[in-house]
Amino acid sequence: MVGARIARESISPVERLTICLRFLSTGDSYSTSGFSFRVGRSPVAGIVPSVAQAIWDCLVGEYMPVPKEEDWRAIAAEFLERWNFPNCLGSIDGKHVVIQAPPCSGSQFYNYKGTYSVVLLAVVDAIYYFCVVDVGAYGKGRDGGTLRDSAFGQALQDGTLEIPPSLTGAEDLGPVPHVFVDDKAFPLRPNLMRPYTGRQLPLPKPVRIFNKRLSGARLVVECTFGILAARWRMYWRVLGLILSNVNACVKATCVVYNYLRRSFQEPFGMEMGTPNGHLPDV
């Protein structure tokens, strides 16, 4: 019949997933990603955030659950074995995800690197798995403030993380708590351990050894961010997405990262001078 409209075929779930994963792995624009599948920009703009959110919702319960007390104990044992740092529950740091400045946002997302970004705050275990992630904090904020305002930071402060109780130490030291290791950008708290600074006075050898071991344990989160960015090239680009879509894409990359590591047992461990990976004392 002349003039009749022909209905277009729907985009299958497999194609939707492929489009989303290609966007995350390349960081190309919606238009460029659509060219590879003969799909217009508008469908791609709807597919990517919806599929990314679906990936997070489906996988987070199995591949990034909030650790329980027995999980924290296993993480602490792994840090002691691999990095020679006892009572460590995880390594904390923030990564700036570069974005285009949102309209009417002023300097809220303008960071110290001279770009606009949102912060991916992550807690990583001793074998490069993401334990907890929080996405969406303003790029202008400091790491300590980002941690304080995050759901993880509030749970840590409220004591609702099911952290194992403190261990009995030497009589003159008292109980030894379990801690998360971080850098000098974070505050010093009973469950947050940062290195000694020593800016004005030289540090004695025991303190230097402590700083070296802490730095080795904290290096895990830096390596994890590097592996994440190497796999998902969207972190190499300036993301021109609205904030909710940025958050969905970032969370999807983190949970798929865990899925791939667990499913294929990828050898991401680092050997740094000693058989179990920790730095030698000097």
Image (cartoon, rainbow, N blue to C red):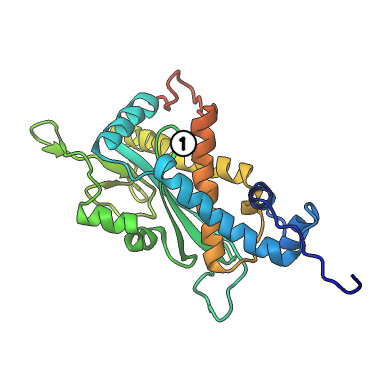
Quarter of the image for residue 216 reads: top left
Q: Is residue 33 left or right of residue 227?
A: right
Count neighbours of disc 1 (C-alpha within 10 A) and say few if under 14, some if 14 to 19, many if 20 or more.
many
Q: In the displayed structure, would residue 89 be above or below residue 141?
A: above
Could you tell me which residue is drawn at 65 percent across and 61 percent down?
238
Image quadrant holding the C terminus, namely top left
Residue that mark 1 sits on: 128
Image side of residue 187 versus residue 166, left or right: right
What residue occupies the far bottom of the structure in this picture?
A: 104
Q: In this view, which residue lies farthest toward the front?
A: 1
Where disc 1 sits, the SS reads loop
225 vs 261: above or below? below
Closest to the observer: 123 or 93? 123
Residue sitting at the far right: 2
Q: Position of residue 172 (x, y in %)?
A: 9, 35
Q: Position of residue 208 (x, y in %)?
A: 35, 35
